[in-house]
Image (cartoon, rainbow, N blue to C red):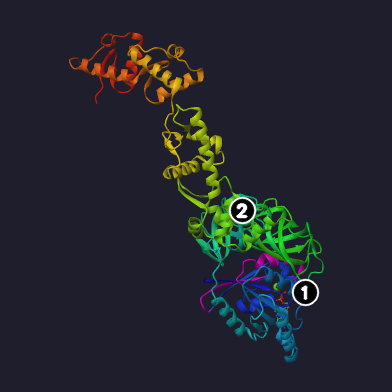
C-alpha cells in the first residue's frame, strides 16, 4: 500500500493543528472562523510524502467536545492515529473521549505525541510521560511509542517522523479492501466550475471516472465526473486512499456528510442492525433496554434505540448482543465498527461491531437468536454462508449478495460457496446463484409430488407445462433461475423435460380398461374414413367414457401425433395424410400440375375435405399453389 492515512486525536488546544503544520508545512485551519477563534471546527487535511515513498494524508480533527461528531467522521477509516497530549496540561476530558473512540473503532496502529515540551521542565515532563503511559494501558496504544516534541522549536520532530515511517512500513492485511465500493462522505461542498464535490476515506473497492454510482441511504443515482486522490487528478481511486469525487446531477444538499457513495444496488438502507455492543467502563450509568442513543457509523450520525437482547440493562464495562433500531435508516456491513453516544448530554458511552446489517425482528431472550449472532460474530465464512442461505430459504441468493453481506470480496466468496457443505451453486444464464440443500430438497419434493398427482390425474398427458409449474408452485423464482434448477435435476435424472413438459423419470402413459378401449375406437374411426374424416363430436358420442376423459383422448391423439389438425375442427389421421401424400406423389409422376378436382378424384373424397387438406399440405411445403394450380414443392 503506498497510501497511508493518519488521523489526529486529542483535547482542544493541545497543539494538533500546529503539529500537522510542523510536519507538513500546511495549515489545516482553513475556515475564517477557525483562524479568528484559533480553533479547529471542521476536518482539516494535509499531505506528507514519507521518505519510504508512501503518500501520507493527515486528517486533522477538532478537539473541542462540541465537534466530536466531526472527529468521529474524520477518524473512521484511518490507518494510524496520532494522539496529541500537551505537556503542560496532560490528559484532559477529550483526550479520554478521543482515546475511547479510537479504541472502540479499533484503529489498528498509532502513537502518542506529548507536545509543547518547550513549556515545561524536565521533571514535569517525566511525570506527564508516566501519566500517559498509565493512561494508554489496556488500549490500542499500549506499548506504542510516546514521542516528545515541540512544534515551535521543532524539538523531537525528526524522531516523530521516524516513528511514523516505521509504523507505515508495517503493512497489514487490509480486510476486504477489494470489496464493493463504499465511500463514507466526510465533507461535501460546491466548487465553482465543477459543481458538487464529496470527500472521504475510501473504505472498500474502486471507483473510476465515468462510473454511475448511488448516494445512500437516499438512493440517488449520480455519475463520477472527476476524481482526485490526495489532491491530484486521477482516473480511478482505490480503497485506503483519501479521495474527492466530482459528482454530476446531484445537489450538495443531497450528499451531506454521513452519506455513502456505493455501486448501484450494492447496499440497501437498513432500519435494523444486529451488533455486539460494549458499554465503556468509565460511564456513570448503565444502558437501559430501548435507550435512545446516537449511532456513529462511517461518517454518519443517526438516532436509534438499543434493544438489549438478553438483559434489561447493560452495566458499564459489559458487552452483549443488541439490535439497533434506527430512527432513520443507514447502510452498514458486517464487521463495521461503530460508536454510540448518549442522546443528551452528548458523551461517548460505548461502541461495537455490526454482525448483521440487515436485521429482522428479533425475539428477546431467545437462545436460538443469540446462537445465530454468535455464529455471525465468530463463525467462519463457510458457516456464515450456510446461515445466509438458510435465511433466504425458498429463494436463490446471488454470489454478489453473499459477498456483500459477509463483507468479503466476490472472488473469495465463489470458492467458499463451491466448497460449502449443503450449498448448491448454479452458474449459467448469466447468473451466479446459490441455494441451500434444504431449499433444493423442498423444491424437488414439491415438484415430484405435483408431477405424481398430475400423471395420475392425466395419464394421457405428457406432463406439466414448465412455465405453469414455475408460476404456480415457484413464484419466487425467476424464469432463468427455474431453468437452472430444472437443468440440474434433468442432469441428475430426477426429472425429465420433454418439449416444454416436465414429467417424472420413467413415466409412461398408464392406460387400461375403458380408456384403452375408447382410445382405440376413436383412432379407428379416423382410420376407417381416411380422407373423409369424421368430426370429433361425432366420434366422441360413441365413446364410453366421461366428457373430461373424451377431451383427454383427443388431446392425447393430437400430442402423440396420431391426429393432425388440418383446419379448425378438422383432424386427419397421420396415416391417412401419409397415404394421401404418396398417392399425390405418384400422380405427379406424369403431370406437372394438378387442380383441386384432380386431387379430389384421386383421393375419392370431396372438396369439403380436400381443400383444407391441400392448404395444410401447402403450409407444410409439400405442395405449392400458383393460382388454381398445384405443383409438387421442391424437396
Ligand atoms: P489544537 O486545538 O489541538 O489543534 O491546537 P493548536 O494546534 O491550534 O494549538 C493551540 C495553541 O497551542 C496555539 O496557540 C499554538 O500556537 C500553541 N502550540 C501548539 N504547539 C505548541 C508547541 O509545541 N509549543 C508551544 N509553546 N505552543 C504550541
Ligand atoms: Mg486544531
Q: Is residue 76 magenta?
A: yes
Residue 169 tag number: none
Residue 93 tag number: 1
Q: Is residue 214 magenta?
A: no
Horizontal side, residue 349 vs residue 155: left or right: right
Horizontal side, residue 388 vs residue 38: left or right: left
Horizontal side, residue 480 vs residue 164: left or right: left
Residue 11 visible, this angle = no
Q: Position of residue 377 (x, y in %)?
A: 63, 62
**Image quarter for ligand 2:** bottom right
> Secondary structure under badge 2?
strand
Q: Relative to residue 342, is residue 500 depicted above or below?
A: above
- Mark 2–mark 1 Cα distance, whole angstroms, equals 36 Å
> Secondary structure under badge 1?
helix
Q: Which residues are magenta?
A: 51-79
* N-term mark: 2 or 1: 1
Q: Position of residue 256 (x, y in %)?
A: 67, 56
- The residue that disc 2 covers is 215
Residue 471 visible, this angle = yes
Amino acid at each position: 500500500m503506498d497510501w497511508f492515512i493518519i488521523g489526529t486525536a486529542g483535547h482542544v488546544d493541545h497543539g494538533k493543528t500546529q503539529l500537522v503544520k510542523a510536519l507538513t508545512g500546511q495549515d489545516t485551519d482553513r475556515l475564517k472562523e477557525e483562524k479568528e477563534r484559533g480553533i479547529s471546527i471542521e476536518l482539516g487535511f494535509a499531505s506528507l510524502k514519507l521518505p519510504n515513498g508512501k503518500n501520507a494524508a493527515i486528517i486533522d480533527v477538532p478537539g473541542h467536545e462540541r465537534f466530536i461528531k466531526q472527529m468521529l467522521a474524520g477518524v473512521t477509516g484511518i490507518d494510524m492515529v496520532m494522539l496529541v497530549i500537551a505537556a503542560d496540561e496532560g490528559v484532559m476530558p477529550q483526550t479520554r473521549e478521543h482515546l475511547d473512540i479510537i479504541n472502540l473503532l479499533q484503529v489498528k496502529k498509532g502513537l502518542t505525541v506529548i507536545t509543547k515540551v518547550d513549556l515545561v521542565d524536565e521533571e514535569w515532563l517525566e511525570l506527564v510521560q508516566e501519566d500517559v503511559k498509565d493512561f494508554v494501558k489496556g488500549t490500542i496504544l499500549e506499548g506504542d511509542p510516546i514521542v516528545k516534541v515541540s512544534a515551535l522549536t521543532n524539538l523531537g520532530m525528526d524522531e516523530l517522523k521516524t516513528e511514523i515511517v516505521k509504523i507505515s512500513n508495517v503493512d497489514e492485511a487490509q480486510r476486504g479492501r477489494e470489496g464493493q465500493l463504499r465511500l463514507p462522505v466526510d465533507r461535501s461542498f460546491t466548487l465553482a466550475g465543477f459543481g458538487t464535490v464529496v470527500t472521504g476515506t475510501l473504505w472498500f473497492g474502486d471507483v473510476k471516472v465515468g462510473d454511475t454510482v448511488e448516494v445512500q441511504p437516499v438512493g440517488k443515482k449520480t455519475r463520477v465526473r472527476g476524481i482526485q486522490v490526495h489532491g491530484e487528478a486521477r482516473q480511478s481511486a482505490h480503497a485506503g486512499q483519501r479521495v474527492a469525487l466530482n459528482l454530476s446531477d446531484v445537489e450538495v444538499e443531497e450528499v451531506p456528510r454521513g452519506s455513502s457513495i456505493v455501486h448501484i444496488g450494492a447496499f440497501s438502507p437498513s432500519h435494523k442492525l444486529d451488533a455486539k455492543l460494549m458499554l465503556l467502563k468509565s460511564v456513570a450509568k448503565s444502558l437501559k433496554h430501548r435507550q435512545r442513543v446516537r449511532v456513529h457509523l462511517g461518517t454518519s450520525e443517526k438516532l436509534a434505540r438499543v434493544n438489549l437482547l438478553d438483559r434489561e440493562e447493560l452495566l458499564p464495562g459489559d458487552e452483549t448482543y443488541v439490535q439497533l433500531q434506527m430512527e432513520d435508516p443507514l447502510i452498514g456491513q458486517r464487521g463495521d465498527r461503530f460508536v454510540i453516544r448518549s442522546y443528551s448530554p452528548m458523551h461517548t458511552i460505548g461502541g461495537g461491531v455490526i454482525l448483521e446489517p440487515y436485521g429482522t425482528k428479533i425475539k428477546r431472550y431467545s437462545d436460538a437468536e443469540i446462537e445465530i449472532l454468535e455464529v455471525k460474530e465468530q463463525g467462519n465464512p463457510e458457516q456464515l454462508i450456510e446461515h445466509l442461505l438458510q435465511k433466504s430459504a425458498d429463494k436463490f441468493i446471488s454470489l454478489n449478495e453473499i459477498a456483500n453481506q459477509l463483507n468479503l470480496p466476490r472472488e473469495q466468496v465463489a470458492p467458499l460457496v463451491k466448497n460449502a457443505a449443503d450449498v448448491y451453486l448454479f452458474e449459467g444464464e448469466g447468473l451466479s446463484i446459490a441455494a441451500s440443500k434444504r431449499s433444493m430438497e423442498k423444491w424437488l419434493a414439491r415438484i415430484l409430488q405435483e408431477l405424481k398427482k398430475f400423471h395420475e390425474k392425466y395419464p394421457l398427458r405428457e406432463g406439466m407445462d414448465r412455465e405453469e409449474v414455475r408460476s404456480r408452485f415457484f413464484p419466487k423464482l425467476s424464469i432463468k433461475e427455474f431453468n437452472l434448477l430444472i437443468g440440474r435435476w434433468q442432469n441428475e435424472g430426477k426429472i425429465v423435460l420433454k418439449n416444454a413438459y416436465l414429467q417424472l423419470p420413467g413415466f409412461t402413459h398408464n392406460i387400461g380398461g375403458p380408456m384403452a378401449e375408447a382410445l382405440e375406437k376413436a383412432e379407428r374411426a379416423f382410420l376407417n374414413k381416411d380422407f373423409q374424416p369424421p368430426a370429433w363430436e361425432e366420434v366422441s358420442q360413441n365413446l364410453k367414457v366421461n366428457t373430461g376423459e373424451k377431451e383427454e383422448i383427443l388431446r392425447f391423439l393430437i400430442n402423440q401425433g396420431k391426429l393432425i389438425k388440418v383446419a379448425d375442427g378438422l383432424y386427419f389421421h397421420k396415416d391417412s395424410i401419409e397415404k394421401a401424400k404418396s398417392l399425390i406423389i405418384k400422380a405427379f409422376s406424369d403431370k406437372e400440375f394438378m387442380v383441386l378436382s384432380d386431387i379430389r378424384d384421386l383421393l375419392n373424397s370431396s372438396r369439403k375435405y380436400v381443400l383444407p387438406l391441400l392448404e395444410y399440405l401447402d403450409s407444410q411445403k409439400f405442395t405449392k399453389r400458383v393460382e388454381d394450380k398445384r405443383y409438387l414443392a421442391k424437396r
